[in-house]
Image: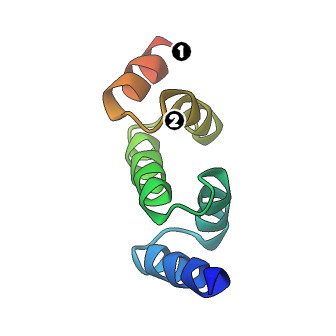
Amino acid sequence: LQFLSYLGACDRLLKQGYEEGQVEEAMEMFQYSEKKAAEFLHLLAQFNDMGFQQNEIKEVLLLCGNQREKALEELVMK
């Protein structure tokens, strides 16, 4: 049952246009919480579009617990 809900969550995130590898990584990082993974992927894409480096974005989002404003401050200060 848990595996099926994981697959369903991954499928919904993939349909939003996120890459498979990123979806799987985000799901693992957030103990398979679709909500938290979706927030993370959304912010990752947003900050990526702003020109920040992906590895820095991931690090900051994890440290800031997906808090957009706090993460943005951290990225700008780097």
For the residue carrying disc 1, how many other residues have a C-alpha within 10 Å: few (<14), some (14-19), or many (20+)?
A: few
Q: Mark 2 or mark 1: which comes first in sequence?
A: 2
Question: With 48 as the anchor, is 54 left or right in this view?
Answer: right
Q: Which of 52/20 is in front?
A: 20
Identify the secondary structure beneath mark 2.
Answer: helix
For the residue carrying disc 2, how many other residues have a C-alpha within 10 Å: few (<14), some (14-19), or many (20+)?
A: many
Quarter of the image with the N terminus is bottom right
Q: Which of 50/38 is in front?
A: 38
Residue at point 52%, 61% (across, down): 33
Identify residue for label 1: 78
Residues tagged 2 and 1 counted as in contact (Cβ below 8 A)? no
Residue sitting at the far top: 77
Q: How is the image coloured?
A: rainbow
Residue at point 43%, 51% (across, down): 45
Residue 61 — which label?
2
Give percent across and percent down for residue 64.
48, 28
Q: Which of 13/51 is in front?
A: 13
Total numbered labels? 2
- Answer with the quarter of the image where residue 68 lies: top left
Question: With 4 as the anchor, is 38 left or right in this view?
Answer: left
Question: With 64 as the anchor, is 49 left or right in this view?
Answer: left
Residue at point 32%, 27% (across, down): 69
Give amino acid for label 1. Lys
Q: Compute the Cα span from label 2 to label 1.
A: 13 Å
Quarter of the image with the C terminus is top right
Rendered position, 35 above or below 9: above
Give percent across and percent down for residue 37.
50, 57
Give amino acid for label 2. Leu
User: Can you tell which of label 2 and label 1 is closer to the viewer?
Assistant: 2
Give percent across and percent down for residue 54.
59, 42
Rendered position, 68 above or below 9: above
Identify the secondary structure beneath mark 1.
Answer: loop
